[in-house]
Every structure is written in C-alpha cells, then in structure tokens.
Image (cartoon, rainbow, N blue to C red):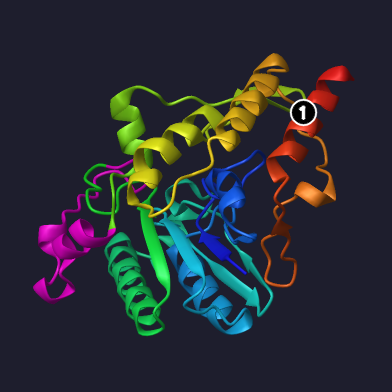
Amino acid sequence: MKRLFTYGCSFTSYLWPTWPSFLTKNFDIVYNRGQAGAGNEFIFHSIVNDLKQFEINSKDHIMVMWTSFYRMDCCLDHTQWSTPGNLAFHKDFDVLNQYILPDGSIYKTFNYINAIIDLLKLKNIKFNFFDAFDLFNFRDSEELPRGVNFTIEAYPKHMKLLELKEKYFSLPYWPTALKEGIVETYQVNDQGNINPDGHPSIKMTIWLLKNIIQPHLDFGINPYVYELGNAIHTEILNKSPMKFPEWPREIMNFTCFDKIVMYKQDNLELYLDFYISCNKT
C-alpha cells in the first residue's frame, strides 16, 4: 500500500482543498497532518509521533511544507496541540516576546529540520521538503516582529544552512508567488463580515503544484486533479463571498492525533459536489 504523509500549517490543511488533496490519485492513502496556525515545533513532533504510531517505513513517502519561524505551538496532551499562529500578531505579544524570541525560534527550526532529515535518511524513507514563507531570507519579513533582520550567514557554520537550502529546498511558495504576481485569495463571509481570507486560492495551489512541487517529484501528478481543482475554484468564485458552513465529515481535515481522517481517492470529487450543492441553495 502506497501511503503519503503531509505536514504543514494552514497552507497544507484548510477550509478548501490544499496541495495534499491533489496527490490522492498517486497514493492509496494520504494522511494530511497539517494544522492551521501550526509552527515548526508542531511539524517536528507530528512527524516523530507518526513514525512510531503509523510505523512509517521505506515504502511510504513524507512531504513537509515548513512554515514561518515565529509561532507558538502548545502541546495540550498526547492527542492535541494548540497552534495560535504568528506571535507577532498575538494579543499577548508584549508578554510572550520576553520568553519566545525570534533568534531562538530560528535556531530551533533548523535543528528540527536537520533532525528530521537524519531520522528519515536513517529509516530510508523518501521525503520532500517545501518552504511556505522563505526560511532562508527573513529580512524585514512581516512574519517576524518589525526591525528583526535575519540572514543565514549569521548562523554557525556547523549548521550548514546554505547546503541545507541547496540540497533539500525548492523556491519558497508565498514570496515566489508574490514576485510572479499570481497571489489570489477568496472573499469570505464570516457571520456577515466580508473580508479577503488571506490563504492561497485553489488556483494558486495548482500553480504551486506545477511550478514548485512537481519538479521535485519522481512521479507525475495526475492531470485530472487539476481539472477538478479548477472546477472547484470556479464554484467558489461563483458564490463569492463564500460562506463556509459546517463541512461534511467525509471531507473534513481533522488534525489532532486521535482524529485522523484519511483522504479517499474521490476527495476532490466530494469537494466539487459540495460546492455545487451550495450554489443550488
């Protein structure tokens, strides 16, 4: 049985199909372990947990979209995490910033990444890493507090960050999309308040798959999923601003350790049927 395990933040698991949804035709089972607001500590521990819990082996494949540094992941117990997201926008930032510092967060992230590389290579597990926001160039990033500058040259040589970047990472997702001018988000109706959601549209996700993910895979992504993705994208735009009701259980992305839902082969078809039914009401 071909299994894929995916990890990341809300760019990996959100209210509409994200990049793991488009890989379901290439695997028997896809476990999407992304979680909105998650940081790299959550990603690291999720992988370590899953290696044991699911007995991940050399027949399996792992894909990780590492996220921004400055996030707080709180392990509530062995089954669930609280992942409030970027600390720079947290209501208690002035307090938290005394204990969770940008430099330390950066240092921990690269230790997490290097440790996962060593683990997966030791177990002979195939893996791909991707970069949501640009791990290697955070100078004046909106993901860090104002005035924080970071370059990989500032870090110890033994961490081999340039080598890490060249060997394991492709172009960063969001900054490259901004540069290419293809950033697109949806208008969302949240209890009467209409605002841009701020997360990549499905059209952006298809661009990500074709231009950043596919070149680093040793298999071709089934083109049929792009047709489905474009159809879902159109349905969402037809009902913009979209009001997202409670989702049918069979297409929900549960992310706590004790609430794992497997993507099925017809996952995108279920999404499409759901959006079409919304437009009929």
38 above or below 11? below
- Would residue 174 be counted in the magenta stretch? no
Percent x, y of residue 272 = 74, 31
Residue displayed at 60% across by 31% down = 229
Query: Front-most of 185 and 57?
Result: 57
The residue type indicated by label 1 comes to Tyr
Drawn side of residue 191 relative to residue 64, left or right? right
Residue displayed at 53% across by 60% down = 6
Residue range in magenta is: 141-168
Q: Which residue is mark 1?
A: 275
Query: Front-most of 112 and 212?
Result: 212
**Quadrant of the frame with the N terminus:** bottom right
Query: Front-most of 173 and 224?
Result: 224
Drawn side of residue 1 relative to residue 248, left or right? left
Residue displayed at 36% across by 84% down = 122
Drawn side of residue 10 relative to residue 176, left or right? right
111 above or below 64? below
